[in-house]
Image (cartoon, rainbow, N blue to C red):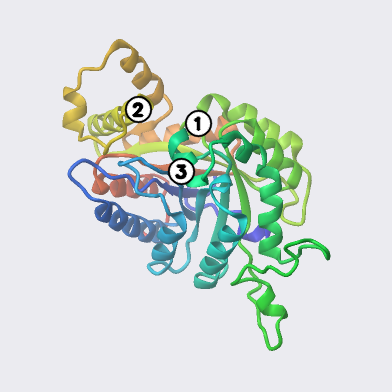
Amino acid sequence: MADEIRGTTHGTAPVPLSVLDLVTVGAGHTATDALKTGVALSALAETRGYHRYWVAEHHSMPGVASSSPAVILAHIAAHTHRIRLGSGGVMLPNHAPLVIAEQFGTLEAMAPGRIDLGLGRAPGTDGATAAALRRTDRLNEGADDFPQQLVELTRFLDDDFPDGHPYRRVHAVPGPVQGTSPGGVQSPHRPPIWLLGSSGFSARLAGMLGLPFAFAHHFSAQNTLPALDLYRESFRPSAVLDAPYALIGVAALAADEEREARRQVLAAALNMVRLRTGRPGLVPTPEEAEAYEFSPAEREFVTSWNANVVHGTPDEVRAGLDDLHKRTGADELMITSNAHSGDIRLRSYELIADAYGLPGN
């Protein structure tokens, strides 16, 4: 399974480059527009040598149309042929493990050998929405049960509950049970599990289980190095990996002109200001962001937020990504380019590919 985890480096990139698509919806645009951009982005990523395309589960956020990763990935699978597709991630406490095993078993049947199952333990939303998803107000209980839920999900994917277990005769279909049925032939692939995190909990757990780890540097940069160190220190070889493999999510936006990059990231930062202050909405236009009167506290937040967004001309972005790789030793960089316009986002990935001499230009 390690071959399905480790990526291939192209051009002059220091490590494999991948795509995290938040399926953002800008002011004046629809979710349909955002999803069409996702299809175009996945095709561009496949052509230009990006290793994988992931979407992340979010809820109750007007500017993010990725509440149903499995549905989006099924659509993307129908429009691509080679690129790996996955979740970055599915929030395990929001769902029954059997449901996730069925969804990703179905995706694996649609796109054999191309599916990744990235799992997180955060709700991917606010507390009230999480309670509505989980049908309980005891949200901490779901996070605390994450290791047990992970074991259950893994057993459903492998169809190997022990004798006497109450789920011994419950099978995730599509899945291995089909290969053990009379006349059955089962795919040799099973979606590899990744653990996602923005702190140390999942880093340590991924290391102890010998699983690949994805860290959310794009919104938790201060924890990146401690979490990666903890993952590597905790790592125990497994049937999945014989050595640690960690990718980091990176906010990066390249534009033909530096000023345009600054305008775009300012709009994305205003969107985050509104989200963090309980006013989530569509991603504003750069013009709206330039006209907005930031309070001193908001301006401080924007400055801090944009300090962790690699942005500018293609050469500046390449230098920033190279420096980030040197500082973290990440095995893969997963780039998320957030902007008001889908065209701007697509152009950013194209420019980054050009800067590194990736194939297909």
Q: Residue 192's x, y, as percent? A: 63, 57
Label 1 sits on residue = 323
Instruction: Relative to 249, say whether 358 is above or below.
Output: below
Instruction: Relative to 215, say whether 354 is above or below.
Output: below
The amino acid sitting under disc 1 is Asp
In screen coordinates, is 122 left or right of 180?
left
Label 2 sits on residue = 278
Label 3 sits on residue = 132
Which residue lies at the image location 70% right of the left edge and 64% below the top edge?
158
Q: CA distance from mark 1 to mark 3?
A: 42 Å
112 or 273, nearer to the observer: 273
Q: Residue placed farthest to the bottom in the image? A: 183
Q: Residue 30's x, y, as percent? A: 23, 50
Which residue lies at the image location 68% right of the left edge and 68% below the top edge?
170
Which residue lies at the image location 66% right of the left edge and 82% below the top edge?
185
Q: Which mark is residue 207?
A: none
Can residue 45 be spotted in the picture? yes
Mark 2 or 3 closer to N-term?
3
In screen coordinates, is 309 left or right of 166?
left
Q: Residue 38's x, y, as percent? A: 34, 55
Q: Nearer the viewer, mark 1 or mark 3?
A: 3
Q: CA distance from mark 2 to mark 3?
A: 18 Å
